[in-house]
Amino acid sequence: MNIAFVMLTYHSDEPAGIERAIASLAAGLRELGHSTLVISANAADGAPDPHVVRLTSVSFPCPVAYEEIPLLLADTDAIGGEVQRILAEHRTDVVCWCDAVSGLGFLSPAGPATRTVLMVHFPRADEAMRQSLAHRPDAVVTVSPFMVEEAARAGLDSRAWHALPNALLTEGSAPDASRREELRRTGPVRVVARADPQKGVADLLRSMPSGLDRPVQVVLAKAGFELLPALQDRYVRECAELADALDAVEILPPLAWEEVQPFFEGAAVALVPSTGPESFSNVAAEALSVGTPVVGFRMGHLPVLIGPAGRSVEFSMPGDDLPALRGPAVRVPSVARHMSALWLATTELLGDEAGYHEASHQAPLRTDSCAPAQVAKEFLKTVGL
């Protein structure tokens, strides 16, 4: 079977959940013997990828600001016609619109013989989302029950939506008990995040307690998209300046997708300081898969994913409005207090030997359902194949 994914911001090793989820699901489908294709509007980076086709009717700058995307997609006839030709040339059986806008869900340019799937990776209830649903896709797939509930709260009929977890790109390996105890006592606290204020890295560093007595290592990466022009550059500079003033903190360069799990394998704990709800949290899943406990805020899907494999801390959010795109930062006056609570939960977990090792034991079990082939089988079942 031939399955296509449309995500115009896609390229390999993009520090973003949607792109990484597409790559892992596609890998699982290929493992089952199917053919996959990703349709992108990004320029090629590095060696050609036989599983990616680049559009010629539209090209995204890197990074592209959200406000620019509707203008870039204004020539819907040319873009839709090219996508239809690509799908026909590859004899596509199923096409997945991986977002209402950047995944062309609002346009849905597929022939009548091709099954269509709308994938919903983050909360949105705007006109583009309603247009995407009006095309009556054969299935709507999202990443967690939280997302189904969020859509319903926003007034969308999500009763027939399917919640399918993101797959892990590779199988992780956990350290043995003696190494894990060594990490608990002296290992680094590690964070992997996109350069977006909503990911909470700057707020986390501002609230870092004195006397932590262990390294804090932060991987901060810029994506091919951003909420506002130059936002990522400004945020990277802000975090770098904060880190320079803190002896124990180190900002590290971006990682390739397959390097994230080994990076977390050497961590005492993984922090996910996002100040907005995570619809799934690939980063948390990658840390858990290698036995590393996770600490984050109690909102979105994150506390469900963590379960007994770490700690979740309460976070107050004003209002119930959904972000229109991947989401502006949620700001509350008490963010420093919340970050202090996150640090406290981290130090308490590291100081609780029995509790820490139980969390580490539970961690890989939290991602049992995230093997690529298993997720791929569930995906095919979900879309009626």
Image (cartoon, rainbow, N blue to C red):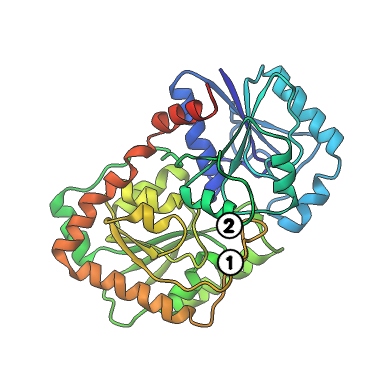
Residue 71's place in the image compared with 187, above or below, is above
Q: Nearer the viewer, residue 64 or 285?
A: 285
Query: How many other residues sit within 10 Å of disc 2, few (<14), some (14-19) or many (≥20)?
Result: some
Q: Nearer the viewer, residue 321 or 50?
A: 321
Q: Amino acid at mark 1?
A: Asp
Q: Is residue 356 left or right of residue 254?
A: left
Question: Residue 105 location, x and y as percent?
Answer: 70, 39
Q: Quadrant of the N terminus?
A: top right
Residue 245 in view (yes/no):
no
**Residue 104 - label:** none
**Numbered disc total:** 2
Contact, mark 2 vs mark 1 (Cβ under 8 Å): yes
Query: How many other residues sit within 10 Å of disc 1, few (<14), some (14-19) or many (≥20)?
Result: few
Q: Is residue 381 left or right of residue 50?
A: left
Q: Nearer the viewer, residue 278 or 55?
A: 278
Q: What residue does disc 1 label?
A: 320
**Residue 153 - label:** 2
Q: Is residue 303 left or right of residue 37?
A: left
Residue 186's place in the image compared with 27, above or below, is below
Question: Residue 121 location, x and y as percent?
Answer: 56, 47
Residue at 44 percent of width and 21 percent of height: 32
Q: Amino acid at mark 2?
A: Arg
Question: Residue 269 location, x and y as percent?
Answer: 30, 61
Residue at 24 percent of width and 50 percent of height: 362
Residue 176 in view (yes/no):
yes
Question: Residue 339 location, x and y as percent?
Answer: 42, 75
